[in-house]
Image (spheres, rainbow, N blue to C red):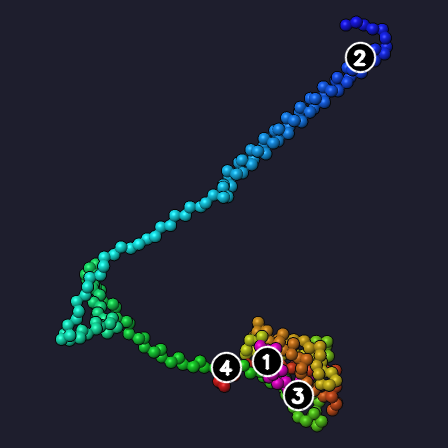
Amino acid sequence: MAISDDPSALVADERRGFAALIGGARRRKAASLGIALALEALIILLLLTLGTQILGDKDGDEVVTAFEAVEFAAPPEPQPEPATDAPPETSPATPQDQPLPTPDPPRPSPLNLNPVPAPEPPPPAPPAPPQPEPKPSPSPTIGARINPGRTYGPADTGNPRTAGDSQQVGTAPNGEPLYAARWYREPTDQELKGYLSTATAPSYALIACKVVTGYYVEDCELLAEGPAGSQIGRAVMAAAWQFRVRPARVGGREQFGSWVRIRIDYSVNRSSR
């Protein structure tokens, strides 16, 4: 190969080399494309062949085999004709007309050789005797006494207008004279039993109270009670607000604000009601 110094010849050689390079690349690309198309066609052909084998032949005829079962039995034997002179046969009794068999009595168990008779029922208990009715307990009665007798001074009785002056029977808690008292209105059992229900009977309480307007009492104090521990004094002090007592009479006139002595007896009535 000769080397030329002509630049145009060099350019022409370069163009020819470049064109040859491009042509070779195109040929290789075309060959690769042809190979890819051939592989795809082969894959499609294989899929069509497998699908035909799986689905089966659509145009093929189906062969159906049918079996029929036939029972071969011997021909029936000829029956003899019934005689005309023979009496007609009676129809057999139906199961409803036949008597039912009587069941056998149960046999004793071989294990129970010596049966024990059942124990006889115990005789009925005799009726309980009638219980006596409980006797009513003695009902307590409340005795309210203003004038306790000779031990605590004489009774202050008589018409309040014509009676004389009240008798002094002691000294009040504040040092003033203490007089025997008279009821203006004696308290009822209903007014006292609610308070005296906590006390023990028989018992008594002695209190000193000041009489105010309206014949009521106030500032009461316990003077004595008996027996000790009967709680009668506390009960009478609680019920004293209901007492209506006349004041002491001095100089022929009632003196409100005077002190009087009151005794309450709490006893038990032994008679049954």
74 is higher (above) or lower (below) than 58: below
Disc number lying in front (3 or 2): 2
Q: Position of residue 221 (x, y in %)?
A: 67, 76
Circles 2, 4 touching at the beta carbon (< 8 Å): no
Residue tagged 4: 138
Circles 1, 4 touching at the beta carbon (< 8 Å): no
Q: Amino acid at mark 1?
A: Lys
Foreground pick, 143 / 163: 143
Residue tagged 3: 185
Foreground pick, 233 / 170: 233
Disc number lying in front (2 or 4): 2
Indicate which disc, 3 or 4, sits on the residue closer to the N terminus: 4
- Residue beneath the point at 71% across and 83% down: 216
Indicate which disc, 2 or 4, sits on the residue closer to the N terminus: 2
Distance from Cα at disc 1 to Cα at disc 4: 15 Å
Q: Quadrant of residue 108?
A: bottom left
- Residue beneath the point at 73% across and 76% down: 174
Q: Residue furthest bottom?
A: 162
Q: Residue furthest left?
A: 85
Residue 5 is a magenta residue: no
Q: Secondary structure at mark 4?
A: loop
Indicate which disc, 2 or 1, sits on the residue closer to the N terminus: 2
Is 207 placed left or right of 69 in the picture?
right
Residue tagged 2: 13
Residue 193's label in the rendered image is 1
Q: Position of residue 211 (x, y in %)?
A: 72, 83
Q: Amino acid at mark 4?
A: Pro
The crowding category of the residue bearing disc 1, from other C-alpha atoms within 10 Å (few below 14, some 14 to 19, many at least 20), is some
Q: Position of residue 269 (x, y in %)?
A: 52, 83
The crowding category of the residue bearing disc 3, from other C-alpha atoms within 10 Å (few below 14, some 14 to 19, many at least 20), is few
212 is higher (above) or lower (below) than 9: below
